[in-house]
Image (cartoon, grey):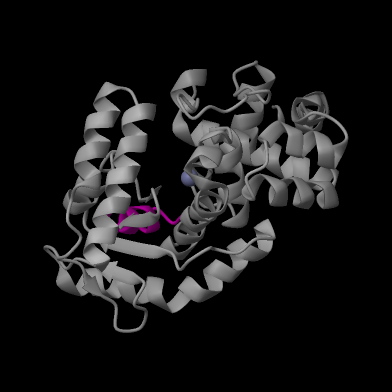
Amino acid sequence: MMQSTLSMIRLLALSLCICLLPGCTLLKTGVALMQSRDAFAISKTDTNVHYLAGASPEIAEQVANRVAAVIRQKREVVEKAHGATFTHAPQIYICHADCFVRFVPVTVNEPAAQFGDSIFMNIDALLKREARGVLPLEDILTHELAHLLLYQTAGAMGYGRVPAWFREGVAQQVARGAGGSEFVTLPEAARMLHNGKHFDPAETGSIFVNRTAPSYHLTTPMFYRQALMYVDYLKASNPAAYDQALHDIVTGKDFHESFRSAYGASIASYWPGFMASIRPLVQ
Ligand SMILES: [Zn+2]
């Protein structure tokens, strides 16, 4: 019964993707959705954490234990930041890179991804990141949980209508900066912004094509860093309005309307002030 319900959910998700995605992504998404998750073991300490031993069983179990140890606390962090709660327990799937790319239509270098109603974590990419001295995988979990909360509460369509720059900015803000932005410094990002190379703060968001780094001719880390800087600026400008807007967005209200209603002005109208604020960083 449970299995048939899961199959039905995946079929519905697949149907939605068929409507929304372009060719190659569509094919990869369809293949990923049809993968069976039966081989994943359930963590002894948290039944919502699943892992596949793969080539290094001990390492897979260690990562699963680390995730299981913090998931409750990370959920609370994400819920508090959004003023909203998960509709049901997040399901986390942990495995090595070769398995990760079978389940998620992204590249082998991605450390983790929220895909539909699940989070997948790539052991190899996560440990490679940690070896570079950036924030630990627990913070990447927080980042993905922020995406998942929006997906659960706003629904797949509501999620799709929130511009990618805002989704990534919020997820990194909640996760202490964990995400692509760790690989770009503030002065580097400020220089790019100053030179007019940045995302569009008036982006409307679209369930069909949601513009990300390549759309703006930015690297992914640069896109993420700029997004985080602007989201931080919006929050610092009016914390109460920010909290209100974020709460409205996660509950599925229109993205731009939520800002206009909370701030009394459009989200893009804050851009000139933001650009003035980063000027001291430009070297
Ligand atoms: Zn993200």
Left or right position of 125 against 77: left
Q: Residue at x 42, y 61 (%)?
A: 137
Q: Residue at x 44, y 56 (%)?
A: 133
Judge whether 230 appears above or below 136 on screen. above
Farthest residue, direction bottom: 44
| Rendering quarter of residue 4 | bottom left
Q: Residue at x 33, y 44 (%)?
A: 12
Does the magenta-highlighted stretch encompass residue 113?
no
Left or right position of 64 against 248: left
Q: From this viewpoint, is residue 129 visible?
A: yes
| Residue closest to the eye, 212 or 176 | 212
Of the 4 image quadrants, the one containing the N terminus is: bottom left
Q: Position of residue 70 (x, y in %)?
A: 47, 74
Q: Position of residue 115 (x, y in %)?
A: 37, 48
Q: What stretch of residues is rendered in magenta?
A: 122-134
Left or right position of 236 against 132: right
Judge whether 264 appears above or below 252 on screen. above
